[in-house]
Amino acid sequence: MRAVDAVMECLKAEGVDVVFGLPGGANLPTYDAFVDGGLRHILVRHEAGGGHAAEGYAKATGKVGVAFATSGPGATNLITPICDAMMDSVPVVFITGQVRTELLGTDGFQEADTIGITMPIVKHSFMIQDPLEIPRAIHEAFYVARSGRPGPVLVDIPQDLSRAEIPYEPVADVRLPGYQPTLEGNQKQIRQAAKALVAAQRPVIYAGGGVVNANAAEELVEFATADRFPVTCTLMGLGAFPARRADGEPHPQWLGMLGMHGTRAANYAMDEADLICAVGARFDDRVTGKLSEFAPRAKFIHIDVDPAEISKNIPAHIPIVGDAKHVLAKLLVEYRALSADSARLGPWWEQIEAWREQYPLGYEDSSDNEIKPQYMIQALHEATGGDAIVTSDVGQHQMWAAQYYDFPKPRRWINSGGLGTMGFGLPAAMGAAVGCPDRTVCCIAGDGSVQMNAQELATCAQEKIPIKVFIMNNGYLGMVRQWQELFWDGRYSHVETGDYPDFVKLAEAYGATGMRFEDKSTLVEDMKRAIATDGPVVVDVKVTREENTYPMIPAGQAAREMVG
Amino acid sequence: MIAVGEPATKEPLSLEELQASGNLRSGRKHVLSILVENKSGVLTRIAGLFARRGFNIDTLTVGPTDDDHISRVTLTVDGAIHPIDQVTKQLHKLINVLKIRDLEPADTVARELALFKISADGAQRGELMQITEIFRGKVVDVTKRSVIVEVTGTTEKVEAFESMVRPFGLIEMMRTGEIAIARGRGET
């Protein structure tokens, strides 16, 4: 069969049910194969939209996302999603077309050195040099993308090779002698960790996106509640531990998110802790602030599937290489066997409760009907019963969504954490909605961010993908404005976006429903109406213009220096 | 105190501050012996990794092994223990990297080959030949005004030879960078 038909068979063999992409010259053969390939293909309007959609799909479903693009500009348009997937460990396979082999290296039309350009931002890549390699390369690409620490894998297929006749045999094995992720965790180290936890007077569990990636939320809850361990999550880990219990009350062991815009309780607890158990988290600078003053009293247990993360930023006292699911399950057994005395944590909880009482997460509500951005998130929580998949762009709205939505489960919060990609939210919502058609999928966008991939509204309209986009519209690039206000003497430089565009008209032009909400008193009901509306909906929510995201650890400072 | 270079500090940064905040560590030399799959682009992946993580490669040699599918990369890096730990861990993440050994200097035989083109007329040639003999070098080319000497040995030996012949007028020097093999029966 043609190599491109083999590509279709490979994808189906990997369990792929949908791909996102855009055709062009170098992948014309591939697109011919889609005609009879029996795979759902969603035509995006910009390759970046397709890449982020594949990420959203992967994050929402836990399966590998797939995005296609042609050579040259098609491939370079994928750079941001590829890098985003690398930073946030998202399993996505990117399949790009390449000019025919005789043109390689000649600056042919739409030629770009895709493999070279993407080398620093992929987990691995395959340059196809022989069409017979295609089935194995695709199978191994999926294997590498999803296993160990997940990440993006690129397969670059020259156009002429994709037209070759090859025998197709499904590939079941992988031949990657240099790639053997360690999942289980060293039993002795795990026992050491359990002993350290039993002895700890002021422990904190610090959980990150690795818990979500390993589908280890249940194990995390079980382990954390085996004693009264305080739990905080990173931006990427939100939902790995429930912010609220089933009855809607705040979970007593949940400290909130930590880091730059985390809660004081979480950051102060890290600061005072004598033992920090990091699970699937990487001590990012947005979490640690000033590294030399981060958690100065603590010893560290660091559980991560990627050995290179352990002791990269903070030296670990008890390193455990393994995935969160395996290690937490074993840690629970070891911990239970030691029958710890829960009472030892009494004074620690008293201290934490005092912080919670003194510094609750909060804001000053408006006295009129103006919508405060924080309230907008709380209203969305109410309108969706706290049960939606929420995607976001990057900026103030992202931090408020992280602070106020109270995610109950993993894979409900989908955002760009590491790379901080504006324009991520809308296409990611599209991908999440395709992957989880029975769930309400909302995108909380910024008026600045949303325009960076607004073209995908056309895709949503055409494919009837019912995402609900709530634009938190303050007419500013809000986070940059906040930093200019706080740290650059209020000298605003190119942060005002004004009233442009008219998002209601824009939505309608794309074939979506447009709405505008400006009244706090009816916001929850209005939001319910928007969510109940069929098809894609874009809501322009006018919020307080110059609200700041607090609390905040100014960049490079220590947790103790939190303001707001 | 705010960390140097965060956007929250609007004070201009002095060049000294920028250097101090960088990862400028110096420690002992490390010789990393790396087995890689013999596939296109592997060397680029390794070199790119070093560049983007801010590690400087001092010398680099690549050559075949007794297995056609596998090549050996030997590289030397200057660094303290910590960055080296990161280097090897990051290298291990490259799918085509099969095995890495950070060779202990005491348990390793390391050699490099160097060619020196030295200006030497009749009067100086004798002394130069003596030095060459002491270093067990070999004269491989002679003209009226120059000599080319081949020296094999550890980096230290090559550098010692260089300092000895530099006063004669060193026209050119070429060095291969070290290859290294573990002492004893076990494989490197």
Image (cartoon, rainbow, N blue to C red):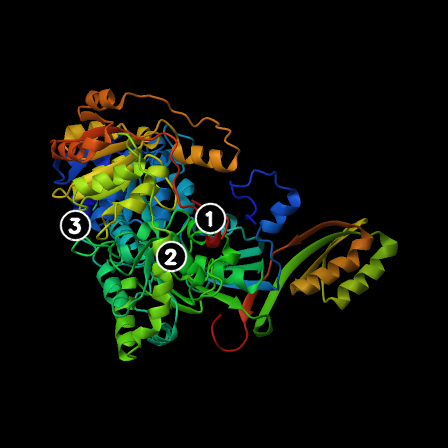
Residue A303 in view of the camera = no
Marks 1 and 3 sit apart, C-alpha to C-alpha, by 33 Å
Q: Which mark is residue B44?
A: 1
A108 above or below A440?
Answer: above
Where disc 1 sits, the SS reads: helix
Task: Kindly identify the amino acid type of the residue bearing the numbered disc 1.
Answer: Thr
Binning the other alpha carbons within 10 Å of mark 3 as few (below 14), some (14 to 19) or many (20 upward) gives few
| Disc number lying in front (2 or 1) | 2
| Disc number lying in front (2 or 3) | 2
Image x and y of residue A440, in percent: 16, 41
Specify whether disc 2 shares its chain with disc 3: yes
**Which quadrant would the C terminus of chain A be assigned to in this image?**
top left
Binning the other alpha carbons within 10 Å of mark 2 as few (below 14), some (14 to 19) or many (20 upward) gives some
Q: Is residue B44 left or right of residue B121?
A: left
Specify whether disc 2 shares its chain with disc 1: no
Q: Which residue is mark 2?
A: A355
**Residue A364 lies in what quarter of the image?**
top left
Image x and y of residue A483, in percent: 46, 37
Confirm or deny contact between disc 2 and disc 3 (CB under 8 A): no
Sequence-wise, the earlier of marks 2 and 3 is: 3
Marks 2 and 1 sit apart, C-alpha to C-alpha, by 51 Å
**Which quadrant would the N terminus of chain A be assigned to in this image?**
top left
Residue at the image point whose x is 35% and y is 33% from the top: A77
Q: Which mark is residue A112?
A: none
Task: Kindly identify the amino acid type of the residue bearing the numbered disc 2.
Answer: Trp
| Disc number lying in front (1 or 3) | 3
Marks 2 and 3 sit apart, C-alpha to C-alpha, by 48 Å
Confirm or deny contact between disc 1 and disc 3 (CB under 8 A): no
Q: Which residue is mark 3?
A: A15
Q: Given the image, what chain letter belongs to the residue carrying mark 1?
A: B
